[in-house]
Image: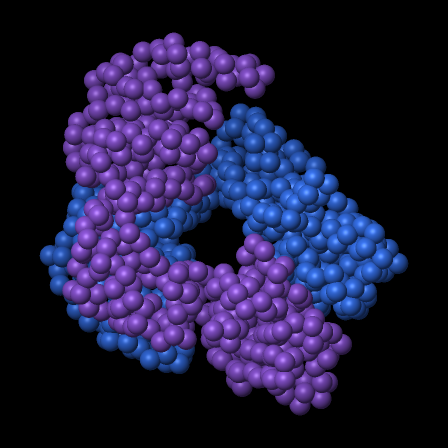
Chain colours: A blue, B purple
Amino acid sequence: MIVEIVSTGDELITGSIVDTNASYIASKFLETGILVKRFSLVGDDRKEIQIVLKEISTRADIVIVTGGLGPTKDDLTAEIAAMVSNDKLILSKEALSDMEAFFKQKNFKMSETNKKQAYFPSKAVILKNACGTAPGFYMNYGKSIFYFLPGVPFEMKEMFKKRVLPDICGKFEVSQRLKSKFTLFGVPESKAAQNLEGFEEKFPMLQLGFRAAFPIIEIKLSSPAISDDVKVRESFSKAHNWALSKFVAANVVSDKGLSMEEEVARLLIEKQKTIAVAESCTGGLISSLLTDVPGSSAYFLFSAITYSNEAKINILNVNQSTIIKHGAVHQNTAEEMAKGVMEKAGADFGISTSGIAGPTGGTDEKPVGTICIGFAKKGYSTAKTYCLNFNDRTRNKKVFAATCLNTLRKELL
Amino acid sequence: MIVEIVSTGDELITGSIVDTNASYIASKFLETGILVKRFSLVGDDRKEIQIVLKEISTRADIVIVTGGLGPTKDDLTAEIAAMVSNDKLILSKEALSDMEAFFKQKNFKMSETNKKQAYFPSKAVILKNACGTAPGFYMNYGKSIFYFLPGVPFEMKEMFKKRVLPDICGKFEVSQRLKSKFTLFGVPESKAAQNLEGFEEKFPMLQLGFRAAFPIIEIKLSSPAISDDVKVRESFSKAHNWALSKFVAANVVSDKGLSMEEEVARLLIEKQKTIAVAESCTGGLISSLLTDVPGSSAYFLFSAITYSNEAKINILNVNQSTIIKHGAVHQNTAEEMAKGVMEKAGADFGISTSGIAGPTGGTDEKPVGTICIGFAKKGYSTAKTYCLNFNDRTRNKKVFAATCLNTLRKELL
């Protein structure tokens, strides 16, 4: 079965944004054992889109097209799909009333231009959009079934996962792969790859994949398409455990593949503990990550983002003398911050950061990348200084936040 | 001039990693006024790479190919380039000795497999690699000049910037584009497009683009390649102002295209004002956004993330009676939070959020998406309730944060 992916959009062909849709779709196909053959990417260019669709319709079985379903003039997909297949656009009353309901729920007035999104090639089957205004559709054209999906990643993913992939799996009888995942922190990707050398010889029936979700690395194992094979099933958990054993426990965030914040949240809930956070250089990122996990009010009590020394002293009861003697970026300050926020919030644990995210503010003694992590629990507090510079303010914030959460994670094990 | 980009690699076609090379190259081309026509991406698949190169050689003037120049068996590019152009591979002694020098400098032993990287089609011109072992090369094939570059982004960028682009600019006499950008908040993309209808008729020489960086929309204007034309220069600023005038000031975040947090930071610095933030449902996101901007310690004093009622009362001096009477998600509570955090931090302004990000926690009276935004300055405080549900916890957090920052932005104008 030949599968191809087409991405459309001026914002993509100009390099304004990177196309993440095609790789998402390809990785989901791979989970069902299908290797995509080719990605093509073109701008909102009527002629070029026509050419690409025509070419592909002569060779592919399945084509996923993203983008160009919006309400604006440069959203051309439905029109071109109708044109190349000698069809015409007709209004879908159902799609229109869905759209009207969507706007009503949001208390927005639906504009006239949105109506365009309710027109589809007459032979198309419409795919409802649960999260936006642009429905997708699919239709036969040439040798291929073309699925047209919105370009907004969030909407595309929902539609692809819930509607398109099950539809394709049903039509082509593809079976599910076995798969597992674990997450690492504090190991460079090259080192992770080195540790796992020999996997392919040892488990030739399985596939090993790496994904960097900075600063976390995901290690993914999967079986080939036909996984009813007993041998494959048997070797699968063996392989997972073999791969895990190549890393020290401190570097393994989750053997289920959870993100750092998800694993910390899971552990806090499991142990019925609460947390308070004092952030300086991470500026709220730790708190935002923790509260991205649904249900975070069960364990997250309070966080203080104390950039200024006054706030550290007044809110967190850091001793003025500690700051005068050592400065704000020091492990003694971080330790007092962690203890202070824990006590203030009445939490079981306090964690803290104080450091230099850059690009400026570094000195010879405390260069950009210096990060002090504090930790406190009842009757005990500690802190540690690291130097972790990734030459970019937001990347530094991310690695600082993960280091702090990792300190808490290890404490919760 | 038709330019196309080809990316190769199994790690790309399987979705293990996202291809960022193509968009980098396209954006650099755009800076010289060249809009790339198409990206193609294939795996390390001998037959498919041949097909793609042959196809493109019949239509493009310039083709940039990345990947497949490494030392391993699945690095096929040089071999395929020779094959399709009826050429043969020959050893470049210069490339070999460069490679030997590279390994020596790093104190690595050069392996036999690396020698493969010193073989090129006999008609190719070699491009030295300043940062790695894989040299690139270029050659004529069909209608096109093909540039073959390494796939490692860092090496590719160096080679593209320093060697390829200057070479192309020299050959084709390309010039710079004019461009401008502004950002909008609170306008659906469809509405933005409607407001700008007529642009193409009015300014036929210019290009208009939209990019959604949820919940912000960027509107981009650019001139075609040849921008020395006086008419184009004259109409450019006229067009920018015309487009801006189609939106009420409250919806325009920045006429320079800054993000919400960058614009708020700029205004706070310009007016020499300081800010404190009290966050409930946004969980630290507002603070993290504000502190993503380098130099944020100039205006950002303190932020309290108060999930629990106790923290709202103890840290922010919210009246217990307010919470008992109205609940935590209420504009009276939000107003007291903003006032409390401003006073606590001694800041010029206080802003706050209290709401329901979902997916659970909503009621009939206060559904998911309910967000109360508080604002305080000396002698004045206020709050407002909105309902903004985007069916996803992290998207809701983003739109809540932007709504809160927008309240502050309008106050700073």
Residue at x 78%, y 68% (from the top left corner): A314
As drawn, the residue found furthest toward the left would be A86
Relative placement, left or right, of B86 versus B284 is left
Relative placement, left or right, of A214 versus A6 is right
Relative placement, left or right, of A323 versus A250 is right
Out of B56 and B295, give the one closest to the viewer.
B295
Answer above or below: position of B143 versus A378: above
Out of A52 and B313, give the one closest to the viewer.
B313
**Residue B194 appears at what percent x and percent y?**
26, 71
Q: Quadrant of residue B311?
A: bottom right
The number of callouts visible is 0
Out of A236 and B115, give the one closest to the viewer.
B115
Q: Is residue A55 visible?
A: yes
Out of B39 and B139, give the one closest to the viewer.
B139
Residue at x 85%, y 57% (from the top left corner): A321
Residue at x 61%, y 51% (from the top left corner): A397
